[in-house]
Image: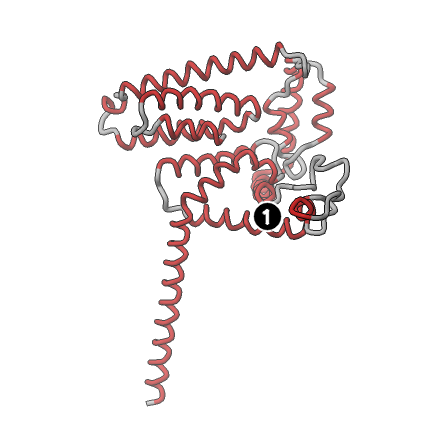
Amino acid sequence: MSGYLLGYLLMTNPRCKTWVRVVATIFFAVMAIGAYFMKPSAIIGVIAIVIIEALFKLKQAQSVKQLLKLPRLSLILGLLWLVVAGATYEAGNRVVLQQTYIPVTQGRTMPAIHFVSMGVSGEGGYNAHDALVMGQLATKEERSAYSKKLLIKRLKKMGPFGYLQFLVKKQRNNTADGTFAWVKEGHFINLDPTPTVTTGLAGNLNQFVYLYGTRLGDFRFIAQAWWVIWLALIALGWSDKRKFVLILRTMVIGGMLYLLIFEGGRSRYLIQFLPAFFMLAALVYDRSFAFVARVYRWGTGQLMHQSKTETGDNDATSH
């Protein structure tokens, strides 16, 4: 995700030389498709770029003719991106099917609706029973039909108001843990959860990150504090309307919506979107501080005004 964002910025920067923008376009396309192969939801960033670029173009256009008129270089770079992205996708598919390191059976793929159905079970996270049934059904059509039936059943059981309550709780679970479930889920440092090195820089670091480290609680506190600060900076910097900031904000919102609809319920699923979170907070922090300063000045001004009013009333009463 960080790679294709870098490629996008260089591709659209008019101050860069043409050859740099061409190379950046190729890099952008390859990184975007590579991100898609690793984690399909990582393509949300590309969708955000397309949406914001289209909205800015609509805002700047004075007529339909001007809307359809694109600079020649921009048109060439856009077409180049599509060609490289298509070629990368085809090459990636071919590599996946031809490699023998991890056997891939195409007929065993899970339909998207399976993860939507799983996303409304329990706390919205992984459901072992659903996964087991998927493995027992022979065809993709059977898996899709079963998942659709299960999704409808779960939604009917919740009802509209119950589903809204569920989404609120799921969003809380999706964003609550600043450690992203470190040593809580998966198999982190599974062989020996006790630090083996206890001296020097490595020893101190081990105490912070190992399951039985003496400073693991400190790590969790620090991680949670920083996570709250980052989220506060992003939330309070809402007034920044620069294009790239809007792209990052759309990526964050899109990622959260994705996790609400599909399998989620755990903060660690946000790790894939951390580049957007970190860059967004870094770009809007000055607006956030300015907003807090304005609120503080307003609050102190109101208190001073109230104090003067009360003093005047007291003086009038005494006389």
Q: Nearer the viewer, residue 268 or 108?
A: 268
**Left or right: residue 59 compared with residue 131:** left
Colour treatment of the image:
secondary structure
Residue furthest toward the bottom? 319
Quadrant placement of the C terminus: bottom left
Query: Measured from the top left, where is residue 58 in percent x and y?
Result: 30, 29
Local crowd at mark 1 within 10 Å, few (<14), some, or many (≥20)?
some
Write the residue at 72% across / 47% down. 198
Task: Report the amino acid beneath label 1.
Answer: Ala
Q: Nearer the viewer, residue 51 or 191?
A: 191
Residue labelled with disc 1? 223
**Left or right: residue 166 compared with residue 284:** right
Q: Is residue 314 above or below residue 99?
A: below
Write the residue at 37% across / 72% down. 306
Query: Measured from the top left, where is residue 55 in percent x and y?
Result: 34, 31
Write the residue at 41% across / 47% down. 237
Query: Measured from the top left, where is residue 1 in percent x and y?
Result: 49, 30
Write the residue at 74% across / 19% down. 136
Mark 1 element type: helix
Q: Nearer the viewer, residue 72 or 302?
A: 72
**Left or right: residue 132 compared with residue 53:** right
The answer to which image quadrant residue 26 occupies is top left
Query: Measured from the top left, where is residue 24 in percent x and y?
Result: 40, 23
Residue furthest toward the front? 200
